[in-house]
Image (tube, helix red, strand yellow):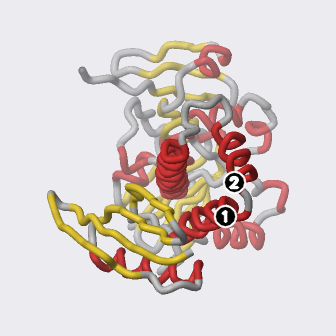
């Protein structure tokens, strides 16, 4: 379904009209302020003072500054606070907003909400190379983009009802919503990507620590099962009580379990730990023989004992192994 962009004509600095091919309908200023952003705004030539400037190879990013500096050498500063321009080749059409237009506090809002801002002179400048344009007592001649004021010639030029794409003025002091979004869209995209990466990183860290905690919990439950305290309301307290009751030898058992826990790597899963008569037998599973060797070296570092690899068996994509060392 096609939609038509509304075109508003501003006459005399305060009168608004809705333009169509067939009619020009008066519109209250409050109605214009309430309109959805993105409309075309044609400003009557009488609200602008036109001049020209030749500037070959003008830098795109600093054009506003160069034009402002140029105007400051030609006109009083208070008259050049608000201006618009259009580039054609090496030349610029510059329209200076008359002070009484910008004294209306609602005018800034009207300009901000406009999708395109232009004028009858700007429309001819953007679509015609050489022409003579008359409005009121003023006649402007444009030859290949070079603008000059000449003596009045003929009747007023006809007012347009449509806004060609090539006729939009650049208005430095106006930031239309669409333009503002275009200016910052890459920063917004980068910010969203950074946030997504941050959230993803947090999720992976959570999964890593959660997996590690689950393995530690499973190992602790196996210890409780082997010690016969798993069904107790306080299995750790019960295990500690039994250790104190059994004397120093039982404390040594807890020490061994602590060292095994510190040495156990992420890719190692404990199956059982059997401690009898000063000998410790550890059975576990992993996915690679290299992980067994790394675990054996780390366990040797923690216990200060020789760690013997007793048995390995590969089955169904995993490796089961058995280590033995002395307390």
| Residue 316 point in image, percent of width and height | 15, 57
Mark 1 is surrounded, within 10 Å at the Cα level, by few (under 14), some (14 to 19) or many (20 or more) other residues, namely few
**Total tally of numbered discs in the picture:** 2
Question: Any mark on residue 6, and which?
Answer: none
| Front-lying residue, 110 or 194 | 194
As measured in the structure, the alpha-carbon distance from the residue carrying label 1 to the one carrying label 2 is: 7 Å
Mark 2 is surrounded, within 10 Å at the Cα level, by few (under 14), some (14 to 19) or many (20 or more) other residues, namely few
Is 107 on the left or on the right of 327, as rendered? right
Residue positioned 35% across, 75% down in the render: 292
User: Which quarter shows the N terminus?
Assistant: top left
Q: Is residue 56 visible?
A: no
Residue positioned 74% across, 28% down in the render: 106
User: Among all residues in the image, which is located at the extreme left?
Assistant: 316
> Looking at the image, do the residues carrying marks 1 and 2 touch, with CB atoms under 8 Å apart?
yes
| Residue 185 point in image, percent of width and height | 49, 52
Which of the 4 image quadrants contains residue 241?
top right
Residue positioned 37% across, 63% down in the render: 283
Which of the 4 image quadrants contains residue 143?
bottom left
User: Which quarter shows the C terminus?
Assistant: bottom right
Question: Any mark on residue 249, and which?
Answer: 1
Residue positioned 44% across, 24% down in the render: 6
Q: Which residue is mark 2?
A: 246
| Front-lying residue, 217 or 188 | 217
Q: Dot 1: what SS?
A: helix
């Amino acid at each position: 379904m096609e939609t038509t962009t509304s075109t508003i004509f501003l006459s005399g600095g305060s009168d608004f009209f809705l333009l169509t091919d067939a009619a020009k309908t008066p519109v209250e200023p409050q109605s214009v302020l309430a309109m959805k952003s993105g409309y075309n705004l044609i400003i009557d030539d009488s609200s602008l003072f036109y001049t020209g400037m030749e500037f070959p190879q003008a830098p795109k990013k600093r054009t506003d500054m160069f034009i402002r500096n140029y105007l400051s050498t030609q006109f009083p500063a208070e008259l050049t606070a608000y201006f618009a321009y259009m580039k054609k080749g090496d030349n610029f059409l510059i329209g200076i907003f008359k002070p009484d237009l910008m004294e209306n506090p609602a005018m800034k809002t009207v300009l901000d909400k406009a999708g395109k801002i232009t004028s009858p002179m700007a429309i001819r400048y953007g679509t015609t190379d050489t022409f003579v344009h008359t409005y009121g007592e003023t006649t402007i001649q444009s030859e290949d983009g070079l603008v000059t004021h000449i003596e009045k010639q003929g009747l007023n030029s006809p007012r347009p009802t449509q806004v060609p794409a090539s006729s939009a003025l650049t208005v430095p002091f106006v930031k239309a919503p669409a333009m503002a979004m275009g200016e910052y869209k890459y920063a917004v995209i980068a910010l969203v990507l950074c946030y997504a990466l941050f959230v993803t990183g947090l999720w992976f860290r959570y999964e890593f620590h959660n997996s590690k905690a689950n393995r530690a919990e499973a190992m602790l439950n196996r210890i409780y099962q082997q010690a016969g305290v798993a069904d107790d309301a306080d299995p750790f307290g019960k295990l500690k009580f039994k250790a104190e009751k059994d004397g120093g030898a039982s404390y040594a058992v807890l020490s061994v379990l602590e060292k095994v826990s510190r040495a156990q790597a992420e890719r190692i899963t404990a199956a059982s730990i059997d401690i009898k008569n000063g000998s410790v037998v550890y059975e576990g599973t992993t996915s690679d023989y290299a992980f067994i060797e790394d675990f054996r070296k780390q366990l040797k570092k923690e216990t200060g004992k020789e760690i013997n690899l007793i048995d390995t068996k590969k089955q169904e994509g995993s490796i089961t192994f058995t280590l033995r060392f002395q307390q």
